[in-house]
């Protein structure tokens, strides 16, 4: 029963991650006046401009920039689920592990883009692919598979052409 609760917490958190990413971070976040605009207008621009690298993750987490706002939202999500810890502790443990895992792998993917491309290709596809309104999951693409929003980009002919084009552009601007 404990294992079932833990797995249910992981699944719930994955669907929550998908939902928040799609409707808050990209839906509401496309409006520059929204609290959530940091994600689309700061984080996505940095990732696109620097081939997944987002230097905000080098700054202190407790500051009011994209990484700090992301961390604050994750702390809020963890705290808002604390009552479940008393009723369904294994479920809460799954939710909490997913929240912590989200921050850890998301940060790593944007500080070490080669690692992110290799181990989180769905997240790489989200940022670098032609449609940034797909591939909503970060930790693992479960909800994307079920909800049919997983669109592979890594390893495609389009990605190869795009990478060559970006490399040529970078070489020209370095001259």
Image (cartoon, rainbow, N blue to C red):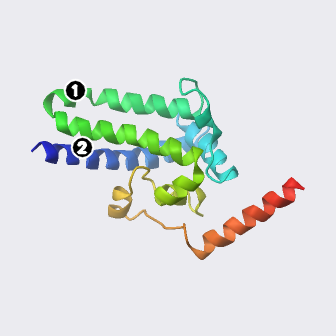
Residue 30 sits above or below residue 168 on the image: above
Residue 156 on image: x %, y %:
56, 73
Dot 1: what SS?
helix
Q: Position of residue 70 (x, y in %)?
A: 49, 34
Does the rendering let one see residue 134?
no
Going 24% across and 36% down the picture, which residue do you hit?
93
Q: Name the front one of labels 1 and 2.
A: 2
Examine the rendering and report whether any part of residue 7 can be seen: yes
All told, the count of numbered labels is 2
Query: Which quadrant is home to the C terminus?
Result: bottom right
1 and 2 marks in contact (CB < 8 Å):
no
Q: Please, is residue 174 above or below residue 76 in the view?
A: below
Q: Residue reaching furthest right?
A: 175
Q: CA distance from mark 1 to mark 2?
A: 14 Å
Up/down of 148 relative to 106, above or below? below
For this rendering, which residue is in front, 155 or 25?
155
Give the percent coordinates (x, y) of residue 173: 85, 55
Figure quadrant of the N terminus: top left
Residue that lies at the very extreme toward the left in this rendered image: 1
Earlier-in-chain disc, 1 versus 2:
2
Of all residues shown, which one is farthest toward the bottom? 157
Residue at image location 47% in from the left, 66% down from the top: 151
- Residue 25 numbered tag: none
Q: In which quarter of the view is residue 63 placed? A: top right
Residue 15 at x, y = what percent?
A: 33, 49
Mark 2 nearby-residue class (10 Å; few <14, some 14–19, many ≥20): many
Is residue 97 rendered to the left or right of residue 153? left
Seen in the image, is 85 located left or right of residue 172? left
Query: Is disc 1 surrounded by few (<14), some (14 to 19) or many (20+) residues within 10 Å?
Result: few
Question: Which residue in the protein does label 2 denote?
Answer: 9
Q: Can you tell which mark lies on residue 83? A: 1
32 or 71, which is in the foreground? 71
């Amino acid at each position: 029963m404990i294992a079932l609760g833990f797995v249910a917490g992981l699944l719930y958190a994955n669907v929550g991650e998908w939902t928040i990413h799609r409707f808050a971070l990209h839906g509401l976040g496309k409006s520059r006046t929204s609290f959530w605009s940091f994600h689309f207008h700061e984080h996505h621009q940095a990732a696109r401009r620097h081939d997944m690298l987002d230097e905000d993750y080098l700054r202190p987490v407790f500051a009011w920039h994209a990484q700090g706002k992301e961390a604050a939202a994750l702390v809020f999500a963890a705290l808002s689920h604390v009552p479940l810890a008393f009723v369904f502790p294994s479920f809460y443990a799954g939710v909490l592990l997913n929240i912590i895992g989200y921050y850890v792998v998301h940060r790593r993917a944007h500080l070490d883009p080669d690692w992110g491309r290799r181990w989180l290709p769905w997240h790489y596809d989200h940022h670098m692919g032609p449609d940034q309104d797909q591939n909503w999951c970060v930790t693992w693409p479960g909800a994307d598979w079920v909800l049919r929003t997983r669109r592979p980009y890594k390893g495609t002919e389009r990605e190869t052409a795009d990478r060559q084009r970006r490399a040529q552009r970078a070489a020209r601007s370095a001259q």
